[in-house]
Each structure stands twice: as C-alpha cells, then as structure tokens.
Image (cartoon, rainbow, N blue to C red):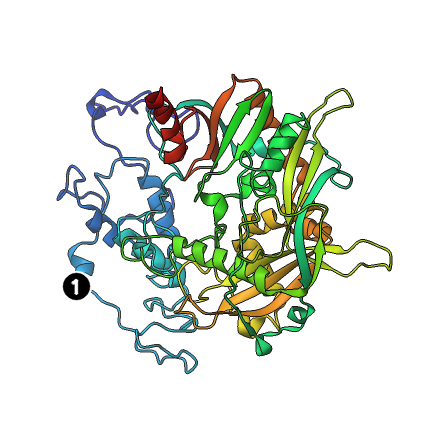
Amino acid sequence: MSHSFVLPPIHDNKDGSWGPSSTAVPPQFKDIPYSPYSKGEKLGRFADWTEGDGSRSLATTTGGARSGPRSGAGRGRAGVEAGGANAFAYFHVEDESSFSLVDSKATAPGGRKGPSGFSRGRGTPRAGGGAGGRGGAAGGRYGSQATRGRRTGGPAGRGGWKDWEKVNRTRESSVPIQPDWNMLEEIDFPRLSKLRLEVDVEEPETVGTFGQVFGYDKTFDRITPKTERPLQILDRVRYNTTTSDDPIIQDLASKGTAKAYATDTILSWLMCCTRSVYPWDVIITHEGGKVFFDKRDGGPFDFITVNENAADPPMETDKEKDSINSPGSLSLEATFIDQHFSFQAVDEKTSFKFQRPNPFTSPEDREPLASCGYRYRVFDLGIDDEDDFKIAVRTQVEAFLPPATAKGPPQLVNLRTLNEFDSKAPGSGGAPEWRSKLDTQRGAVVATEMKNNGFKLSKYAVQSVLAGVDVVKIGYVSRVNPRENSRHATLTTATMRPSDFIAQLTVSLSNGWGIVRMITDKILKMPEGKYLLIKDPNKLIIRLYSIPATAFMGEEEADIPEEDEAAE
C-alpha cells in the first residue's frame, strides 16, 4: 500500500508582505491573535504562556526597554509591536529586577561635580548610567528635564527653569464686561497687521501751538554709569486731559476741522496695538458725524508698562501682590520715573513759548508748570483726492535745543525713559546688569530692551513722529538698590532721530494708519453713541462693544440729570 502526501494550499500575500494573508485565513486559525515581527528580529521565546491578555502595567512595560549603542533591534521591535497585539510580547521581569550595572571605570579628571552630584561638564564619554553622560539613561540635560516633566504629569519634553513654580498666566480684563454691553465685532491681530494706508507725515497741518518748554540740560548727555546722577523729586504740574475734555479739541470739532480726534498717546497706542500684550481699552464716541477717541481716568493710558513683551513678563500672584516687582508696582514706578526725569532733565533758566499759553491752566493756579508744549496737528487719511478724511491730534513735546542754524527754529525734544528694576528678579527678561554693561556692551542692553519693551518703545517712536520733534532723548534710569523702589539714578542717556528710531524698531506707520482708518470707518457706519474698543487680556484679539451713554461717567456727571429732575 502506497502512501501519498498532498501539500496544503499556500495563500501568498498579494502585496508581498511577511506572514499569512489577512484575506485568506484558514478556519482553524481564525480569532487567534497574531503578533507580527521583523525578519531580522532575534526571538527570545517562542511563546509566553504566563500572560494572555497583555494587561501588564505601564511601569512594567517600560521597565524592560533598553537604551545605548545596541538599541537597533529594540527600535525595530518597538516599531512592529506598536501595531499589533502584545500577547506574545516578552518582558524581562524577574531577570532584570535584581540586576544592576556597576561602572568600575575611573572618572575623567575634568568632570567636576557640584554639591548636588551632577557633572558640570559633559561627564565621562561612555558613562551610560551617569546623569552627565551623553547617552545615559537620564538622557543628559534634555533627558533629565523630560523625566522631570513626566514625573509631574506634564508632557515629555524639554522644560524650563522651575516650571512647576510658574503660575497660570491668565490676566484679567482692563475693565469688567457688563451684561448690557453688546459686542459688535471681533478682530484678530493677524488681520490688523495686513492693513496699509500711506500717509504723508512730513507735512501735516499744525493748527495751533500752546504752552512753554524749557531748554534741555546738555549735562545729561555726559552722564555715565560711573558718574550717575540721582533722580530728583520735583513738584511740577503736567496735564493729561482726555480728548473730549480738551477745550482746543472742542473748538476744532465745532469748526469741522476733521472727522476724528485723538491725543498722541491714544493714537500711538492704536497704531502699535498689534505689539501689545497687556489688556487695554479705548472709549470711542460717535457724535455729529465725528469720532472722538478717549481714555478712562486711571486706565492703562495713564501708566507705563515694564517688560510687557518679555518671554517671561512680571506676573502678579497672591503671595507677591504687594511686591515691588509686581506688574502694578513696576508700572507705577516706571510712570514716576518718566515724569520726574522729564522734570529734571531741563534747564528752567532758558525757555521757549509757543503761540498761546497752556490751555489747561487758569490764573488762579499757583503751582509751577512742567516743561510741556502742545502742538495740534491735522493728518490727511484720505485714500484719494476726493476722500476728505482728516484726523486732528494733540501732540506733546517736553524740551527744546538751540536752532541748528542761526535763523532756524529751535529743535523740539521728546524726553522718555527706560528703567531697570532688578536683573535677577523674575520677569527681568534676561536683561544684563546696566551699571556694568552700559559702557562696554550698550548694544546688548538696547537689544534686550527692544525685545522686552517693544510695544512701549514703538509708542515712543510713533509719538515723536506725530509731534514732529527733531530729537528723542531716552534716559536709562536704575534703582540705587535693587530691593528698594524709592531711590533711582540716571546712568546715561541716548539720543536719536525719530526716523532712525522708527527704522530701528521696524515700526510700520502705514500699517498703523490703516488700523486707525479701519476702526474710524467702522464707527462712522454705526449709529451715533458710545462704543468701547477693548483688547482681550489673554488673546491677540480686539473687540468692539456698544455701551450705554452713561458708562464710565463720573459720579458727579451721573448725578447731574437726577439733580435737574429734582429741581424741576
């Protein structure tokens, strides 16, 4: 009797891949888990009957992973096992749990260790288990931070210095949003950045000049960090009246001089708003076919920010609310410094009077006025010759210099400041220590300030262009003691032309004029009333609200109608 052997049918994969075809599985092998593997894989065990469902913990699974020069096979296994069931996966449990590697090699003489035991240098080239090793279990500098992130439940990756101590940077709105306010539009900063409007800023119409300025004290140009000058506290008065309360603006509006009215502070803020980080708001009034941009008393426009654009700006927490390095304290300090520097950096023995006296004083006022002049200028924002669109702006100058020529007019000067609080405090933005770096590395100091205070410096530059000044003087003022915010000293001053200032900061005036024109056009198309333009405290978005006519009115103004009704 002869026996015959018949080969079973072989179902090859059409795509040429390894393993049985998924479309032609024999009935006796259905519903049996199959673990794909690489052809180059070295099998450790044929089958593992101790585990059937792959329910091992994550700690056990990751504990068997190896790293180092022989990790090629491990990478192949991980890549294949990730796509299939882990029923046949082999884990080293008892073998390696009691196994430890001891490095008996001598440490290289160059690898000094600090108090915590971590190597300051690169460590031993082949010390795979050391934290300072390049391919060790900790992964070097990056691996240790990734491990720290996993311990705290955060994503694996490179972390920052003391990430676990940083508070959630959620800011509050500059003004509480009321339920009776109606949001009309929301515009993000990328859309604002695309706006363009070319305006001739060289030849605006100056419709009036008011006030008196003193000569700039040139001895401030010779101040160095070694010959610093203490900041003096002088009793002077300077008015910062909002647009609608300005009597000159009211007179210009009654004559129909322009369609929009603003101050240089508000206008420069709007023109550079895409660089802002902190929240702010502008009150806009549409009345009689004209638009008035106003600020709130005690609002963001009355103060100067510090390190607003820094990667890690100052933040106010509950434990540091009263700290001298909190955002509110730093803002008050910067505003105080800016005012008193402009009071001190002038020589009151020489003065220059404009056409008319200060419009905000009365004969009864006996307090000495600060050096301040107001120039009311009209800019043409028309798109073409037929488009009659003008904006009237109240600009401000703080000092003057002698004429460049014998018969020329005096040179007008703007006085501004940058202040240093504590280069080692949180929120300093990596600023170098001014007293040691201003003489030798002034470029590094300037570059850091442009990075940390880009919005503030951009407003300074735009204000100088709007006012038509010839020179901008910036004083570098620092604390006498970093832990005390009551005493300051001027370390040096910088002089620059407005055109160079604008170019150095890469400020686009055409973009700023486009933003102002777009906002004004939207208000003119809406019914007459009061509106509020507000920046979102945590997003790069501005929102336009329609608000009641009595919003933001003082208590005295709000009580006037009631008193009139009672009198009747």
In the image shown, does 65 or 52 lie closer to the viewer?
A: 65
Q: Is residue 277 visible?
A: no
Query: Looking at the figure, which quarter contains the N terminus?
Result: top left
Q: Given the image, on which type of amino acid does mark 1 rest?
A: Ser
Left or right for 266, reference 499: left
Left or right for 211, reference 110: right
Q: Is residue 126 visible?
A: yes
Q: Residues within 10 Å of mark 1 (few under 14, many from 20)?
A: few
In the image shown, does 220 or 144 lie closer to the viewer?
A: 220
- Image coords of residue 393 (percent x, y): 64, 37
Instruction: Tell me the quarter of the picture where residue 352 sits.
Output: bottom right
- Image coords of residue 205 (percent x, y): 75, 37
Q: Residue at x 36, y 70 (%)?
A: 127
Left or right for 251, reference 128: right
In the image shown, does 153 or 380 lie closer to the viewer?
A: 380
Which residue occupies the extreme left position in the image?
50
- Image coords of residue 151 (percent x, y): 26, 54
Q: Residue at x 36, y 64 (%)?
A: 136
Residue bearing the label numbered 1: 98
Which residue occupies the extreme bottom position in the image?
109
Q: Residue at x 44, y 55 (%)?
A: 332
Instruction: Tell me the quarter of the picture where residue 36 sits.
Output: top left
Q: Residue at x 21, y 46 (%)?
A: 58
Left or right for 128, reference 468: left
Instruction: Tell me the quarter of the picture where residue 560 sits.
Output: top left
In the image shown, does 19 or 390 lie closer to the viewer?
A: 390
- Image coords of residue 353 (percent x, y): 71, 53
Query: Looking at the figure, which quarter contains the C terminus?
Result: top left
